[in-house]
Image (cartoon, helix red, strand yellow):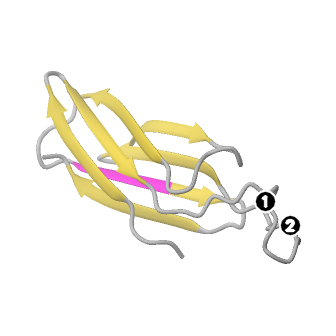
């Protein structure tokens, strides 16, 4: 399992801007190791975010996304102290959810 995501959410005007640093190796399945064997694919396939249980962002990813990707998105309707939850699922079935409060 990977390290926790770093989630920062702040209100800017009418919008809440969320920044997420996801901790994941994101192997494409095309790289070879030192012995010449192909490193198996291991990447996030889906990432989503909820604000107080309502989905505010959903994305489908593939093997071309970099290691430890950074995601930023905005939505309307957030208030200071509200909860943001970000969840990812990778191609091996691993899943992680981390939460943060809007500043």
Magenta stretch: includes residue 85: yes
Q: Which residues are magenta?
A: 83-87
Indicate whether 76 appears above or below 34: above
Q: Residues within 10 Å of mark 1 (few under 14, many from 20)?
A: few
86 left or right of 19 in image: right
Give the residue drawn at x 49%, y 46%: 48
21 left or right of 11 in image: right
Name the residue beneath numbered marker 2: 38
For this rendering, which residue is in front, 68 or 73? 68
Q: Residues within 10 Å of mark 2 (few under 14, many from 20)?
A: few
Pick whichever of labels 2 and 1 is earlier in the sequence.
Answer: 1
Give the residue drawn at x 82%, y 55%: 30
Whether tag 2 and tag 1 are in contact, CB under 8 A, the answer is yes
Name the residue beneath numbered marker 1: 31
Return the mark for residue 20: none
> Regarding mark 1 in the picture, which secondary structure is present there?
loop
């Amino acid at each position: 399992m990977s390290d926790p995501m770093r989630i920062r959410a702040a209100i800017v005007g009418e919008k809440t801007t969320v920044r997420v640093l996801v901790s994941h190796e994101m192997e494409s399945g095309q790289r070879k190791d030192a012995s010449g064997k192909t490193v198996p694919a291991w990447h996030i396939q889906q990432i989503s975010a909820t604000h107080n249980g309502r989905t505010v962002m959903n994305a489908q990813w593939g093997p071309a996304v970099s290691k430890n990707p950074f995601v930023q998105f905005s939505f309307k309707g957030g208030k200071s102290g509200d909860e943001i939850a970000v969840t990812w699922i990778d191609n091996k079935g691993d899943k992680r959810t981390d939460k943060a409060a809007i500043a």
